[in-house]
């Protein structure tokens, strides 16, 4: 049983050798527009935090 598993694992490894690893995309682009978007979003979240803090 264990030998079969080992063999299967070896085969799987062989299959995956040629595949390229996926590159993680950056969460935001550092262009001016990206930065603007990010700052707007952070301002919005700050406002939201202040609002929820006030309500408590």
Image (cartoon, helix red, strand yellow):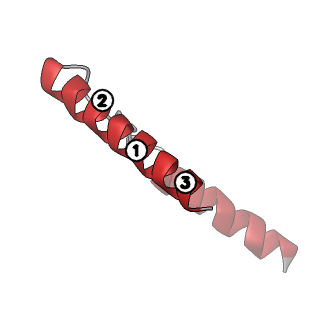
Q: Nearer the viewer, mark 1 or mark 2?
A: 1
Q: Residue at x 16, y 19 (%)?
A: 32
Query: With 30 as the anchor, is 9 left or right in this view?
Result: right
**What is the count of numbered marks?**
3
Q: Which residue is mark 1?
A: 47
The answer to whether marks 1 and 3 mark residues whose Cβ atoms lie closer than 8 Å is no
Q: Is residue 34 above or below residue 2?
A: above
The answer to whether marks 1 and 2 mark residues whose Cβ atoms lie closer than 8 Å is no
Helix, strand or loop under label 1: helix
Which one is earlier in the sequence, the residue at label 2 or at label 3? 2
Which one is earlier in the sequence, the residue at label 1 or at label 2? 2
Per the model, the C-alpha gap separating discs 1 and 2 is 12 Å
Q: Nearer the viewer, residue 23 or 51?
A: 51
Q: Residues within 10 Å of mark 2 (few under 14, many from 20)?
A: few
Helix, strand or loop under label 2: helix
Q: Residue at x 24, y 24 (%)?
A: 35
Q: Nearer the viewer, residue 46 or 55?
A: 55
Which one is earlier in the sequence, the residue at label 1 or at label 3? 1
Q: Is residue 34 above or below residue 56?
A: above
**Quarter that holds the N terminus:** bottom right
Q: Nearer the viewer, residue 44 or 2?
A: 44
Per the model, the C-alpha gap separating discs 2 and 3 is 22 Å
Query: With 4 as the anchor, is 32 left or right in this view?
Result: left
Q: Residue at x 47, y 56 (%)?
A: 15
Q: Which mark is residue 39?
A: 2
Instruction: Pinpoint residue 54: horizontal percent, then vertical percent.
Output: 55, 54
Q: Which mark is residue 17?
A: none
Q: Which residue is mark 3?
A: 54
Q: Nearer the viewer, residue 23 or 31?
A: 31
Instruction: Pinpoint residue 2: horizontal percent, then vertical percent.
Output: 85, 73
Residue 27 visible in rendering: no
**Quarter that holds the C terminus:** bottom right
């Amino acid at each position: 049983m264990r030998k079969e598993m080992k063999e299967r694992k070896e085969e799987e490894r062989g299959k995956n050798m040629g595949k390229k690893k996926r590159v993680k995309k950056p969460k935001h682009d550092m262009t001016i527009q990206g930065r603007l978007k990010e700052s707007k979003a952070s301002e919005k979240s700050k406002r939201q935090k202040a609002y929820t803090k006030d309500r408590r």
